[in-house]
Amino acid sequence: MTRIALIMHEPLASAFAACAQHVLGEKPDIHVVDIAADECTDAATERCLLEIQQECAPNTLILCDLYGATPFNVARRVQQALQAQGDAAHLLTGANLCMVLKALTERGQNPECLSQEVMGGAVRGIVDAACQY
């Protein structure tokens, strides 16, 4: 099973986890790491690794909000550290609630397929509501 981690600007990761709990009706099995605006990148990376490595799993999917921002830089370092340990770690940016829900409901897939499903879920979640009536 693939472990799922949200590494995002504070309080977005916690908010996505709370929304997922509301939608799914149970507390999601997900690692939530909110990155404060003034948090040191090195300290945040260590904190993320400690959180994520509490669960022993060879596959990790990390969802991040903005490419190139501090949470992305932390997530990228975490991904590289996991890969250096021999884990399969994938990082997707531009996370939205559809992606989080898809990751949680499809997590039994191998990480490559899961990443593709999660990206597809993001696109399918974008709907021009005016065209649906």
Image (cartoon, helix red, strand yellow):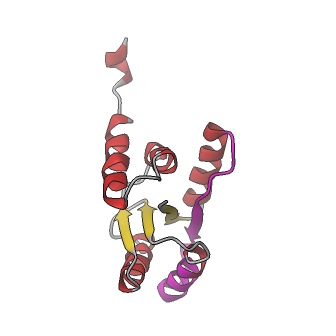
Numbered circles on residues, count: 0
| Residue displayed at 60% across by 75% down | 51
Relative to 4, is 35 above or below? below
The span picked out in magenta is 25-49
* Residue lying at 42% horizontally and 80% vertically, measured from the top left: 82
Q: Quadrant of the C terminus?
A: top left
Classify 51 as above or below 29. below
Q: Is residue 26 left or right of residue 126?
A: right
The residue depicted at 41 percent of the width and 85 percent of the height is 85
Q: Find out whether residue 41 is within the magenta segment.
A: yes
Q: Residue furthest top?
A: 133
Answer left or right for 11 relative to 1. Answer: right
32 part of magenta stretch: yes
Question: What percent of the width, then of the height, locates residue 54?
Answer: 62, 76
Question: Residue 60 occupies which quadrant of the picture?
Answer: bottom left
Image height check: is 2 above or below 76?
above
Residue at far bottom of view: 42
Q: Is residue 47 left or right of residue 1?
A: right
* Image spot of residue 11 (x, y percent): 60, 60
Looking at the picture, tell me which residue is in the foreground, 113 or 36.
113
Viewer-proximal residue, 39 or 13?
A: 13
The structure residue drawn at horizontal position 68% and vertical position 39%, both measured from the top left corner, is 25
